[in-house]
Image (cartoon, rainbow, N blue to C red):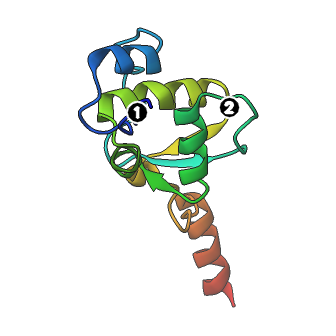
Amino acid sequence: MSAARALPGPDDSPDRLYTVTGGRSRPPENAFDLVTLIVAEQPPAPGMQSELARILELAAAPTAVVELAAELALPVSVVKILLGDLLEGGRITARHPRFAPSKARLPDLDTLEQVLHGLQRL
């Protein structure tokens, strides 16, 4: 009988991580930080790399990069590289909470002055 293989975990060998990232060691510049919210735009495709498919499943609802890394039991740097691939392919969107659009956009000063003058004439 053959011995059962251990499931991948946080103690993955460097060889496996090298294979998962396609030999790349750096994520895209300034694309993601730990709290960037990732949202899947497409479902996983048949035959897709298992880690990429799992990211798309987890990101069906907005999920932070750090949460994805924890769920995948992979280093954050590796997850950022994988996210870069998905972002480049249009399969995800990335939003940083501080750059999220504001709830209400204020009108410009000229418009406010015109409204004020119109109200004063009433």
On-image quarter of the N terminus: top left
Is 49 situated above or below 100? above
Q: Marks 1 and 2, how far apart in space?
A: 16 Å
Amino acid type, label 2: Gly
Q: Nearer the viewer, residue 31 or 8?
A: 8
At horizontal 56% and vertical 58% (from top left) the residue drawn is 108
At horizontal 72% and vertical 45% (from top left) the residue drawn is 43
At horizontal 41% and vertical 8% (from top left) the residue drawn is 23
Comes first in the chain, label 1 or label 2: 1
Is 99 situated above or below 33? below
Is 105 situated above or below 69? below
- How many C-alpha atoms fall within 10 Å of the one at disc 1: few (<14), some, or many (≥20)? many
As drawn, the label of residue 50 is none
Residue 73 position, x and y percent, is 34, 42
Residue at the extreme bottom: 122
User: From where the camera sits, is residue 26 visible?
Assistant: no
Residue 21 position, x and y percent, is 44, 18
Is 28 situated above or below 56? above
Q: Nearer the viewer, residue 8 or 41?
A: 8
As drawn, the label of residue 79 is 1
Which quadrant of the structure image shows residue 47? top right
Classify mark 2: helix, strand or loop. loop
Q: Specify whether 29 is left or right of 89.
A: left
Residue at the extreme right: 46
As drawn, the label of residue 90 is 2
Residue at the extreme top: 23
Residue 20 position, x and y percent, is 45, 21
Q: Nearer the viewer, residue 31 or 83?
A: 83
User: From where the camera sits, is residue 3 visible?
Assistant: yes
